[in-house]
Amino acid sequence: MLKSVQLGRNSGLMVSRLCLGTMNFGEPGRGHQGDWTLGIDDARPLFKAAIDKGLYYFDCADIYGVGASEMVVGALLRELLPRDQYVLTTKISNPMGRNPNQGGLSRKHVMEGVDASLKRLGVDYVDQLIIHRHPQGIAGHESSPIEETMEALNDVVKAGKVLYLGASSMFAWQFAELQLTAQMNGWARFVSMQNHYNLVYREEEREMNPYCVKSGVAITPWSPLARGILAGAYQGGFGGGATARSQGRDRIRTESLYHGDAVFDIAARVMETADKYGKAPAQIALAWLLSKPGVTAPVVGVSRVEQLEQLVAATDIELAAEDIAYLEELYQPVQNLLSIGSS
């Protein structure tokens, strides 16, 4: 069974040690991940297994399946658990249509986007609303005033539609600026940072992670398994995809994220360490991440119950210091993906 942890030092919210990412649930064929999306009937056993294992923290976004994921996730959670027994997060900012006001983090879209998400989810509030990138890091919205965004976010909190705020991938100076803007105006601040962090992309260790640790912000990384690379899905190279996701359109996205020369050499060390411990590679990669300061609840994605069971079991693995050093040894600095706009 998963343990519960506090979502950082700045909130009293308790969450499960893992968060279930829901990008792959919705309407098959709809959205950018449509070729590996599971419909509601295929998703139900995964949600039941998660709940049985003590996982009650779920992460969604309006853009997943262009709204379809929120509908499936909301329906399953309403079916399986009372509202006070799960923690539900969703994200806004990505364009949900062609009109310029259907995306971004203007006051208009924050208000309308939150209401639309609540309607699709079928709930009165979400436990956490995450901004899906920095207000000025969204194409077509680079000039959005951060004061407008932060006040609008504060207003949806005060209205009871959102209980806590979170942020996602951005530069540490941008995050600090948002937090200070909220603090100076007495507005709600972010209690979590959902950033891109795993064994083959560790640039967040330079500034963002230390800032979060120092300021009490929970770190809830996305792509802890590097989109399957650290689980062995690519079998040594991008041409070796062994899953529907790694063979489909998502492979292009994966290749755009991981440029380091040592990516697959590090993945090979994960497999080697997995053999040493008698575990699966995905378990070792996740155990490494959970050993890092400030990491509270990584966001994991699964398509089979056995994958979920493996990742839950990984939370009990303690890696020896020499094995952590061995896994980290080959990493070389890479270009921060935020600087080229692809993270």
Image (cartoon, rainbow, N blue to C red):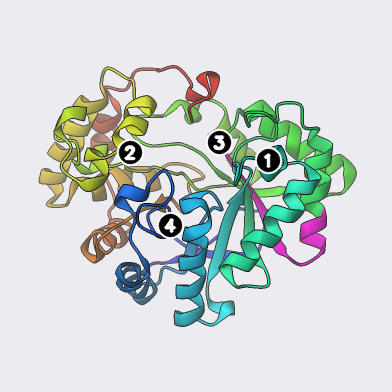
| Residue that badge 4 annotates | 22
The answer to whether mark 2 and mark 1 are in CB contact below 8 A is: no
Query: 68 or 144, which lies in front?
Result: 68
| Magenta part of the chain | 155-169
Say what secondary structure mark 4 lies in. loop
| Residue that badge 2 annotates | 250
Q: Residue at x 44, y 60 (%)?
A: 17
Q: Give the quadrant of residue 45.
A: bottom left
Say what secondary structure mark 2 lies in. helix
Query: Disc 2 or 4, which lies upstream in sequence?
Result: 4
**What x and y, as percent, mark residue 321?**
29, 38
Q: Residue at x 51, y 19 (%)?
A: 340
Q: Nearer the viewer, mark 2 or mark 3?
A: 2
Q: Residue at x 17, y 50 (%)?
A: 280
Query: 274 or 154, which lies in front?
Result: 154
| Residue that badge 3 annotates | 169
Q: CA distance from mark 2 to mark 3?
A: 19 Å
For the N terminus, the image quarter is bottom left
Q: Give the quadrant of residue 234.
A: top left
Q: Amino acid at mark 3?
A: Ser
